[in-house]
Every structure is written in C-alpha cells, then in structure tokens.
Image (cartoon, helix red, strand yellow):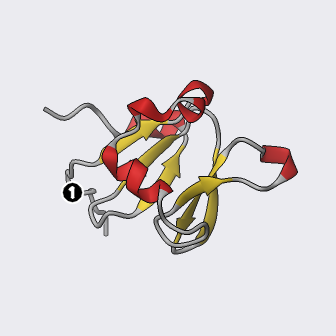
Amino acid sequence: MRYRKRPVVIEAFQMTKARREDNREWPEWLNRAWQKEPGEMGALYPSMNHDSLGMLMIGTLEGPHLVSWNDWIIQGVKGELYPCKPDIFAASYEAAE
C-alpha cells in the first residue's frame, strides 16, 4: 500500500550561528523550549560535547538530537520539537498562508 502525508501546518525556525548568538528573533515556542530542563523532552539547550560547543540540542522521544548550523527546528502538530536538515526541509515544506 502507498500513503500520502496529510497536509499540516507546522512552525519552523532556521537556526544559524548568528541567531544562536542573538535570540531576539526566536519565536515564543522556541523561547519556552529554552526554559525547560536540559534533556527533557521538548527542551532546547546548549550542547556540552566539545566537538559541538555553541550548538544546540533538542530533547526528543528518541533521545537528544544535535541541531547543526542552518538546520530548521520544527514544532510538530503535538508541540514536539525536532531538527531538520535544510535540503530535507526544502523538499518537504513550503510557506503556508
């Protein structure tokens, strides 16, 4: 059997190094995620790994996920957060009205 993904509207924010250093453009849902405890599901927090210092992590059901520069952070239909690579984002999403 074949399936088509239902059209849903999501919230997303592209995390660049500049946006990491200056969070004034962050949407409210991302600011709320920053206030959660590191490792908690839906939390956004700094990476403590020496290879990715300055980058961010997201707590997900599958465990922590690294947010690389220029990744999109997506808030799903149930409020969950997850990172998405720019090429996958461009192939999967378009601006909603």
Q: Is residue 60 above or below residue 19?
A: below
Q: Secondary structure at mark 1?
A: loop
Of residues 20 and 67, the one nearer the viewer is: 20
Of residues 28 and 16, the one nearer the viewer is: 28
Residue 69 location, quadrant:
top right
Quarter of the picture holding the C terminus = top left
Q: As shown in the figure, which amino acid type bears the numbered disc 1?
A: Arg
Lateral position of residue 69 relative to residue 54, left or right: left
Lateral position of residue 29 relative to residue 86, left or right: left
At 60% from the left edge and 56% from the top edge, which residue is drawn? 45
At 25% from the left edge and 31% from the top edge, which residue is drawn? 95
Lateral position of residue 96 relative to residue 40, left or right: left
Q: Is residue 25 above or below residue 27?
A: above
At 44% from the left edge and 58% from the top edge, which residue is drawn? 33
In the image, farthest residue toward the right: 50
Density class for disc 1 (Cα within 10 Å; few <14, some 14-19, many ≥20) is few
**x and y, in percent, of residue 75 in the image:** 36, 54
In the image, farthest residue toward the left: 97
The total of numbered circles placed on residues is: 1
Residue 3 location, quadrant:
bottom left
Q: Which residue is mark 1?
A: 6
Q: Is residue 94 above or below residue 47?
A: above
**x and y, in percent, of residue 42 in the image:** 46, 65
**x and y, in percent, of residue 12 in the image:** 36, 42
